[in-house]
Image (cartoon, rainbow, N blue to C red):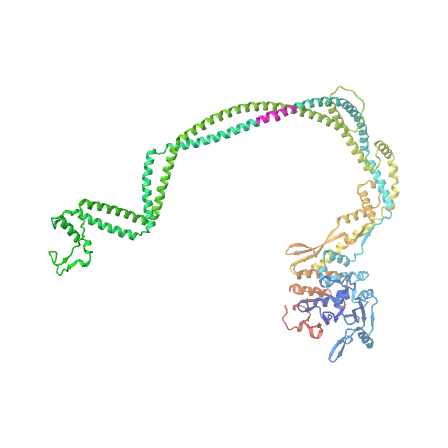
C-alpha cells in the first residue's frame, strides 16, 4: 500500500512529506488557497498514470501547465511515492525538458539523505544526477520505467503475490493505460466529476460488463432477405385475394360508366355553342340599355338635380340671413318703442348735465386749489359764525345800540364807523389827546381824536341788506360743506361723475335711436318684401326638384332592372362556361350521340354518371395502389396487373414449399447472442439491487434514510433483443405468424444498419434518496444536497465501487482525498471515517481548521517562500493534539 507521499520543489512546496501508514485517517489543516488540494491531487501521478484521465482542481487535466506546476525544474523537482508490499520501494516522478513525465523506481524506503545535502548548516536539494549518484553509492537499485505501460503494470496487479501498489480482484480488466480500478479511482480524487453518466460507466466497470455487447453485420443477409421476401409474397397474395376479385369487378364497372359519360359529353358540347351565342346577343342589348340610361341619369338629370339643390340651398341661406336680419331689426324697434318720451329724455338730460357740471366744478376746484379738509372746515366755522351773528343782528335789529344812541342818521353813520374796526385801524397821528380815564357808564371819555377830512361814512345796513348777506353766507357755507364732503369722499365723487356721464351717454343714445326710428321702419318693410320673394322662388325650385327626383327614381329603377337582367344573363353564361370547363376536366374520348334533352338535363346526367364513375375510379385506384403495395408490384397497367396476379395466385403452393430450406439455416444463428446479452443485463440488475444497493443502504448519511441506484431499462432495445432471441425452430407455417415475421424484420433492420448494441445502451440510472419518508430523484450533474452531504454521497458510491475492484486486505489500503471537510457535518464525519476503515480506505481530509475524529493532523502555514511540511514539525497525532477541535 502507499506509505508516504513526498513532494520536493514544486511551485508551492519546497518540501512536503505526508505519511499514511500510521493512521486510519488524517487531516491537512491550513488556510484557503495555501495548497492543500495541490498536495493531495499529486495522487493522480501514481493511480491514474494516463495524463488525459487525470483530474486536478478547477477540472484541469494532466496537461503540460499542470506538470510544470508540480515540476517547475526538470532536474530538481520530484514526487516520491513510498510503497510497502512485502518490502519497501519508491516510485519517483519528474519531468524532462520537454515537459514529459519520467517514472523511476528505487528499492528502498524514502530517506532525506538521498535527496538533500547539508552545506554550511543548511540543506540543499540535490539535482537528479546527484540523487542517482547517491543511490549508486548506497547500493540501492535505481531503474527507469521504459514507458507508462510499465508504470501502470507496476502500480496494478491481480492477486497478492505481486508487490504492486494496488492488488486487484481477478475480475478486473486492463485496457491500455487504464483498468477498471483507475477509471473509477479518478472520481475519488475529484468527486465533482461524478455525473449520472459517469456513475453508470463506473457501475458497469465494477461488474466487468464494459465489454459486453452484440454486433450485427450483413453476413448471411441473403437467406434472411429471401425468407422474408418469399414469406411476404405468400402473405401478401393470400391477403389480397378477396380484394383482387372486387378490384376486377370495379374495373369492368368503370369502363361501362366511362362509355355513358363519353356519349353525354358529346351531346352537351353539340348544344353548347348555339345557346351561348343567343345569350350573348341578349346580354349586349341589355348592356346598351344600361349605358343609355346611365348616361341620361348621370349627364342630364343628376346635373340638373345638383343645380336645383344648389339654388334651393342658396335661397335657404338667403332666407335664413333675411329672417335673422328682420328679427334683429324688429328687436331694435321693440327696444326703441320701450323708450321714455323724447321730451322726458331731454329734461332728464338737462338735469344730469347740471349735476355733471357741479361735480366737475367741485372735483376741478379740489384738484386745482389742492384744498384740504382742514382749510374747508375752518372756513365753514367762520361762515357759521358770521351766519349766527347776522341771524342775531336781524332778530335784534330794532334794539341795536347804533339805532338808539342818536336820532340823526348821519350821527349813526359816524358812530357806526367809530365803533368799527376800520376806525381802530386809522393812523396814530390822528390822536390829539389820549384817554386817561375810563369808567361806566360810557361817555366819549376825555380823549381827543382828529377825524380825517376825507372820511367816507358807510350806510348803515338795513334788515333786507342783512338777510341778503345772510343768504350769500349760507350759500357759500353749503358750497363749502358740499366741498368738504367731496374732499372726504373724492373717489366716490369721481365714480358718481362717471355714472352721471354714462347716464348722459345712454340718454343721448336713446335720443339718437328715436331719431333713427323712421329709417328703421323702412328697412324692416324692405326685408319683409325680400323674404316673400325668396320664399316664393324656393317653393318653385322645390316643386321642380321633386318632379326631377321622381324622373331620376323611375329611370334608376329601370336601370336596376336592366342590370339584374344583364347579371342573370352573365350568370347563365358563366354557369354554362363553368359547366363546359368542368366537363372538359372529365378525361374521356367523346362518342357520337343524339338526344333532345336540354343542356341542364345533360349536365345533371353527366354529373350523376361521372360521380359514380369517379367513386368507382377512386375505389378502383385505391384498391389498385393497395394491391400493388401489398404485393410490391411495379405494374402500372391494370390489365397487366390483373394478369400478373392471377398467375401469382395459381403458384402459391410452390412458393410455400420453397421457404422450408431457408428456415433451417437461420433459425438459431442470431438468437443465442441476443438471449445471452439480455441474461447478462438481468445479472447486472441483480448485482445492483441485491449487492450494491444493500451496501449503500448500510451507510447512514445525515437525514437520508436510504440511498439506492435505480436502473431505467431501454425498453426499445431490450424488446428488440427479446424478439431476436425468440427466433428459433421456424417452419413454413410459423412464418405466416405475425409475431415471428416481425422478429425477423427486427433482426434484418439491425443487420442492415450494421448495428452494435453496447452494454451501456441497455439502461440509464437514477439516484433515489429517501428523506423523512419522502423519495427524491437526483441527477449527479447537479448538487444533491448540502455541500457535505453531496460529497459524502458521492464518496460512498465511488468507494463502494472501488471496494469491489481492489482486494480487501489490510496491506492494500487505498488513499483518497476529501476537500472542505468542514462542510460535512459532525454526524457524517465519523460515519465516513468508519466506512473508510471498514473498507480499507485511508481518507485524507482538508479544511482551514481542525475537526475532531481523525487519527492525525498536518498543519500548513503560509510562508514568504515555498511551504514546507514534515512529520516532525507539522504532524500531530490525535491523542497528542492539545488544541480544541470542532
The percent coordinates of residue 764 (x first, y second) are 74, 53
Q: Which residues are magenta?
A: 291-305
871, 808: nearer the viewer:
871
209, 601: nearer the viewer:
601
343, 52: nearer the viewer:
343
The answer to whether 544 is drawn above or below residue 769 in the figure is: above
Image quarter where the N terminus lies is: bottom right
Q: Tell me: 372 left or right of 253.
A: left
36, 766: nearer the viewer:
36
Which residue occupies the extreme top position in the image? 596
The percent coordinates of residue 706 (x first, y second) are 67, 57
The answer to whether residue 809 of the structure is visible from this angle is no
Please identify the dominant SS of the magenta region. helix
> Is residue 256 shown in magenta?
no
The percent coordinates of residue 174 (x first, y second) are 81, 61
Residue 91, image quadrant: bottom right
Image quarter where the C terminus lies is: bottom right
Count of marks overlaid on the render? 0
Which residue occupies the extreme front position in the image? 453
Q: Tell me: 845 left or right of 663.
A: left
The percent coordinates of residue 192 (x first, y second) are 71, 60
The answer to whether residue 113 of the structure is visible from this angle is yes
Which residue occupies the extreme bottom position in the image? 120
Residue 633, image quadrant: top right
> Is residue 301 shown in magenta?
yes
The answer to whether 611 is drawn above or below residue 501 in the figure is: above
Amino acid at each position: 500500500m502507499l506509505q508516504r507521499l513526498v513532494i520536493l520543489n514544486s511551485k508551492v512546496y519546497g518540501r512536503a512529506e505526508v505519511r499514511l501508514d500510521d493512521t486510519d485517517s488524517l487531516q491537512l489543516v491550513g488556510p484557503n488557497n495555501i495548497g492543500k488540494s495541490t498536495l493531495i491531487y499529486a495522487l493522480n501521478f501514481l493511480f491514474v498514470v494516463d495524463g488525459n484521465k487525470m483530474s486536478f482542481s478547477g477540472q484541469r487535466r494532466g496537461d503540460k501547465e499542470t506538470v510544470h506546476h508540480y515540476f517547475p525544474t526538470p532536474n530538481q523537482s520530484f514526487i516520491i511515492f513510498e510503497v510497502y508490499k512485502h518490502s519497501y520501494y519508491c516510485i519517483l516522478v519528474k519531468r524532462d525538458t520537454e515537459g514529459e513525465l519520467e517514472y523511476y523506481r528505487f528499492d528502498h524506503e524514502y530517506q532525506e539523505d538521498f535527496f538533500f545535502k547539508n552545506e554550511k548548516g543548511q540543506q540543499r536539494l540535490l539535482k537528479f544526477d546527484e540523487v542517482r549518484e547517491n543511490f549508486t553509492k548506497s547500493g540501492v537499485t535505481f531503474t527507469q520505467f521504459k514507458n507508462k505501460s510499465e508504470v501502470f503494470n507496476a502500480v496494478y496487479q491481480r492477486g497478492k503475490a505481486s508487490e504492486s501498489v494496488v492488488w486487484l480482484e481477478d475480475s478486473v480488466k486492463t485496457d491500455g493505460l487504464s483498468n477498471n480500478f483507475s477509471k473509477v479511482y479518478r472520481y475519488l480524487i475529484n468527486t465533482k466529476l461524478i455525473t449520472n453518466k459517469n456513475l453508470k460507466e463506473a457501475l458497469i466497470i465494477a461488474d466487468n460488463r464494459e465489454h459486453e455487447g452484440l454486433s450485427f453485420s450483413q453476413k448471411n443477409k441473403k437467406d434472411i432477405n429471401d425468407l422474408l421476401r418469399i414469406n411476404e409474397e405468400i402473405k401478401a397474395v393470400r391477403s389480397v385475394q378477396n380484394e383482387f376479385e372486387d378490384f376486377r369487378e370495379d374495373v369492368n364497372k368503370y369502363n361501362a360508366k366511362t362509355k355513358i359519360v363519353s356519349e353525354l359529353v358529346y351531346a352537351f358540347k353539340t348544344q353548347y355553342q348555339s345557346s351561348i351565342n343567343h345569350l350573348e346577343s341578349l346580354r349586349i342589348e341589355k348592356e346598351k340599355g344600361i349605358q343609355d340610361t346611365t348616361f341620361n341619369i348621370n349627364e342630364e338629370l343628376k346635373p340638373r338635380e345638383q343645380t336645383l339643390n344648389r339654388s334651393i340651398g342658396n335661397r335657404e341661406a338667403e332666407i335664413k340671413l333675411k329672417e335673422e336680419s328682420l328679427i334683429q331689426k324688429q328687436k331694435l324697434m321693440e327696444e326703441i318703442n320701450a323708450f321714455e318720451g323724447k321730451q322726458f329724455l331731454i329734461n332728464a338730460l338737462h338735469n344730469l348735465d347740471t349735476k355733471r357740471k357741479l361735480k366737475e366744478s367741485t372735483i376741478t376746484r379740489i384738484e386745482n386749489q389742492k384744498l384740504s379738509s382742514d382749510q374747508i372746515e375752518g372756513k365753514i366755522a367762520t361762515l357759521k359764525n358770521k351766519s349766527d351773528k347776522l341771524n342775531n343782528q336781524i332778530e335784534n335789529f330794532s334794539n341795536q345800540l347804533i339805532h338808539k344812541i342818536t336820532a340823526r342818521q348821519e350821527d349813526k353813520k359816524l358812530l357806526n364807523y367809530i365803533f368799527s374796526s376800520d376806525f381802530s385801524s386809522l393812523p396814530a397821528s390822528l390822536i390829539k389827546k389820549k384817554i386817561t380815564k375810563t369808567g361806566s357808564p360810557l361817555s366819549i371819555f376825555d380823549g381827543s381824536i382828529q377825524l380825517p377830512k376825507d372820511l367816507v361814512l358807510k350806510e348803515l345796513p338795513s334788515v333786507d341788506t342783512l338777510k341778503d348777506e345772510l343768504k350769500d353766507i349760507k350759500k357759500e357755507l353749503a358750497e363749502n360743506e358740499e366741498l368738504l364732503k367731496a374732499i372726504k369722499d373724492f373717489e366716490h365723487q369721481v365714480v358718481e361723475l362717471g355714472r352721471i356721464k354714462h347716464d348722459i351717454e345712454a340718454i343721448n343714445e336713446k335720443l339718437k335711436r328715436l331719431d333713427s326710428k323712421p329709417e328703421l321702419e323702412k328697412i324692416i318693410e324692405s326685408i319683409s318684401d325680400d323674404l316673400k320673394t325668396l320664399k316664393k322662388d324656393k317653393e318653385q325650385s322645390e316643386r321642380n326638384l321633386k318632379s326631377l327626383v321622381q324622373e331620376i327614381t323611375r329611370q334608376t329603377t329601370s336601370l336596376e332592372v336592366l342590370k339584374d337582367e344583364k347579371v342573370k344573363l352573365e350568370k347563365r353564361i358563366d354557369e354554362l362556361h363553368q359547366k363546359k370547363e368542368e366537363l372538359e376536366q372529365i378525361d374521356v374520348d367523346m362518342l357520337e350521340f343524339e338526344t333532345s334533352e336540354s343542356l341542364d338535363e345533360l349536365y345533371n346526367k353527366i354529373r350523376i354518371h361521372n360521380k359514380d364513375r369517379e367513386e368507382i375510379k377512386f375505389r378502383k385506384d385505391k384498391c389498385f395502389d393497395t394491391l400493388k403495395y401489398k404485393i410490391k408490384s411495379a405494374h402500372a397497367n391494370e390489365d397487366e396487373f390483373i394478369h400478373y396476379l392471377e398467375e401469382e395466385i395459381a403458384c402459391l403452393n410452390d412458393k410455400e414449399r420453397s421457404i422450408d430450406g431457408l428456415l433451417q439455416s437461420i433459425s438459431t444463428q442470431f438468437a443465442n447472442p441476443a438471449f445471452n446479452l439480455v441474461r447478462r443485463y438481468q445479472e447486472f440488475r441483480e448485482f445492483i439491487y441485491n449487492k450494491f444497493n444493500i451496501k449503500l443502504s448500510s451507510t447512514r448519511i445525515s437525514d437520508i434514510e436510504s440511498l439506492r441506484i435505480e436502473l431505467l431499462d431501454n425498453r426499445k432495445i431490450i424488446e428488440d433483443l427479446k424478439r431476436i432471441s425468440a427466433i428459433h425452430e421456424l417452419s413454413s407455417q410459423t412464418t405466416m405468424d405475425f409475431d415471428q415475421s416481425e422478429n425477423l424484420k427486427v433482426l434484418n433492420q439491425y443487420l442492415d444498419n450494421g448495428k452494435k448494441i453496447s452494454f451501456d445502451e441497455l439502461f440509464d440510472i437514477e439516484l433515489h434518496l429517501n428523506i423523512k419518508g419522502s423519495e427524491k430523484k437526483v441527477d449527479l450533474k447537479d448538487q444533491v444536497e448540502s455541500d457535505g452531504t453531496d460529497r459524502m454521497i458521492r464518496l460512498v458510491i465511488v468507494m463502494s465501487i472501488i471496494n469491489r475492484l481492489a482486494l480487501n486486505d489490510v496491506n492494500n489500503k487505498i488513499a483518497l482525498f476529501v476537500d472542505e471537510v468542514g462542510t460535512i457535518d459532525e454526524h457524517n464525519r465519523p460515519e465516513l471515517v468508519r466506512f473508510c476503515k471498514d473498507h480499507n480506505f485511508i481518507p485524507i481530509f482538508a479544511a482551514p481548521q481542525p475537526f475532531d475524529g481523525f487519527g492525525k493532523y498536518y498543519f500548513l502555514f503560509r510562508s514568504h517562500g515555498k511551504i514546507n511540511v514534515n512529520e516532525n514539525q507539522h504532524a500531530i497525532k490525535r491523542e497528542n493534539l492539545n488544541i480544541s477541535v470542532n
